[in-house]
Image: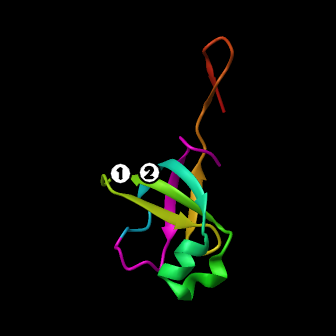
């Protein structure tokens, strides 16, 4: 998983209302850190897990958290050296 990959949300308990099936593009990957835990103490169990920041098709940007939210990376065809595509 890396910046630029496409992802699809499968499930999130976040009340923000991002619906399952929504797709977006990864714009940044960081980790849940001490500042996140100080702001929201009930997420301490997530410390060190990846926060995957996604620009969703709806135009908003929001992170999903590995091991908390369920999402999948959408396979994309890769380019050959000669410019063709392959799976």
Judging depth in this view, the residue of 34 and 85 nearest the camera is 34
Magenta span of residues:
1-17
Give the residue at x 48% y 74%: 12
Callout 2: SS: strand
Magenta stretch encompasses residue 3 = yes
**What mark, if any, has residue 86 been given in the picture?**
none
Q: Are marks 1 and 2 in contact (CB under 8 Å)?
A: yes
Rendered position, 77 above or below 68:
above
Callout 1: SS: loop
Rendered position, 53 above or below 36:
above
Judging depth in this view, the residue of 56 and 28 nearest the camera is 28
| Residue 74 coordinates in the image, percent (x, y) | 57, 48
Disc tally is 2
Q: In this view, does 46 lie to the left or right of 20?
A: right
Its colouring scheme is rainbow
Quarter-of-image position of residue 58:
bottom left
Q: Is residue 57 left or right of residue 30?
A: left
Give the main secondary structure of the magenta stretch: loop
Quadrant in which the C terminus appears: top right
**What mark, if any, has residue 57 been given in the picture?**
1
For disc 2, the neighbor class at 10 Å (few under 14, some 14 to 19, many from 20) is many
Give the residue at x 37% y 68%: 18
Rendered position, 48 above or below 7:
below
| Residue 6 coordinates in the image, percent (x, y) | 52, 46
Magenta stretch encompasses residue 5 = yes
Q: Distance between the residues labelled 1 and 2?
A: 5 Å
The residue positioned farthest toward the bottom in the image shown:
42
Dot 2 corresponds to which residue? 24
| Residue 11 coordinates in the image, percent (x, y) | 50, 72
| Residue 73 coordinates in the image, percent (x, y) | 59, 52
Q: Upstream in the sequence, badge 1 or badge 2?
A: 2
């Amino acid at each position: 998983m890396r910046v630029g990959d496409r992802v699809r949300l499968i499930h999130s308990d976040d009340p923000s209302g991002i619906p399952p099936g929504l797709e977006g593009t990864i714009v940044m990957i960081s980790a849940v850190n001490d500042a996140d835990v100080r702001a929201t103490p009930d997420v301490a169990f997530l410390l060190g897990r990846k926060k995957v920041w996604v620009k969703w098709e709806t135009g908003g940007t929001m992170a999903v958290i590995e091991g908390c939210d369920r999402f999948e990376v959408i396979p994309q065809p890769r380019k050959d050296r000669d410019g063709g595509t392959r799976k």
